[in-house]
Image (cartoon, grey):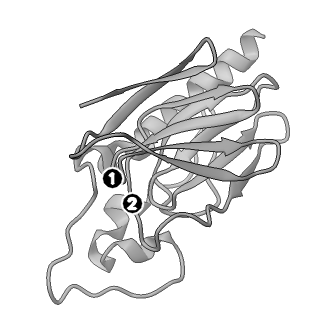
Amino acid sequence: MKKKGIIVAVFFAVILLASTAAISSNRGPSKSDGEKITITGTPMDNFPDAQRAKFCETGDAKNNEYVTEFKIPTKCTQPLAITTDSDGMIWFGQTNTGKIAKFDPTSKQFTEFDNQGWPQKGRSMFWGMAYANGDIWYTDDAYNSVWKFSTIDNQYERINYPTKQDSLPHHLKIQNNQVVVNDF
């Protein structure tokens, strides 16, 4: 059990480091007129070419005696929120794609789950995430939503966060089968 906790802590540290550029600017870069955007058909298309190194690259995965990094297969997903399930799988949100992804620490494999309800070129910060009863719950500040992803049937459900203005749902916690959300 201690090994799983270490893997989660290390994975969280890597995601945190990979997300620092995106977090510091919240919604990411702004596009100036005339900036070149080479269409790649990947999440990098949300950024002008000149800003891709800043927002989409973290370099090669590195290892030492304390930390093992793993490279997410899809560039520029900008991972942020993270949780684990009862089987020790590591789940995280990809803020530049609207997807949930899973990392299996035993096989060291990633699985990304397409989100058909996500707006094309949509971007949001997923700050809070929790697992309960086969579901991953996470916050979505750009669209004032809380999402539920079923790990059983791989389906997403978007729940509008009740507000008349931008509330920025932030963290969440599952308590007694209720989702408790705080916002700004």
* Residue type (three-letter) at the residue carrying disc 2: Arg
Residue 142 pos. (x, y %): 33, 52
Residues tagged 2 and 1 counted as in contact (Cβ below 8 A): yes
SS of the residue under disc 2 = loop
**Quarter of the image with the C terminus in it:** top left
In the image shown, does 49 or 165 lie closer to the viewer?
165
Q: In the rendered view, does 49 fall on the left or right side of 39?
A: left
* Residue type (three-letter) at the residue carrying disc 1: Ala
Vertical placement of residue 62 versus 60, above or below: above
In the image shown, does 184 or 104 lie closer to the viewer?
184
The numbered dot on residue 123 is 2
Q: In the rendered view, does 30 fall on the left or right side of 17?
A: left
State the image quarter where residue 56 is shown.
bottom left
Q: Measuring 81% from the left and 49% from the top, which residue is drawn there? A: 153
Q: Is residue 66 visible?
A: no
Vertical placement of residue 28 versus 43, above or below: above
In terms of sequence position, does the residue under pointer 2 or pointer 1 come before the other? 2
Point out the frontmost of discs 2 and 1. Answer: 1
Vertical placement of residue 13 versus 94, above or below: above
The numbered dot on residue 142 is 1
Q: Measuring 15% from the left and 79% from the top, which residue is drawn there? A: 32
Residue 8 pos. (x, y %): 63, 25
Q: Is residue 165 visible?
A: yes
State the image quarter where residue 29 is shown.
bottom left
Residue 27 pos. (x, y %): 28, 55
Q: Measuring 31% from the left and 49% from the top, which residue is drawn there? A: 21
Q: Measuring 54% from the left and 82% from the top, which residue is drawn there? A: 41
Residue 165 pos. (x, y %): 21, 46
State the image quarter where residue 45 is shown.
bottom left
The numbered dot on residue 76 is none
Q: Residues within 10 Å of mark 1 (few under 14, many from 20)?
A: some
- Kindly report the distance in space between the C-alpha atoms of the residues bearing marks 2 and 1: 7 Å
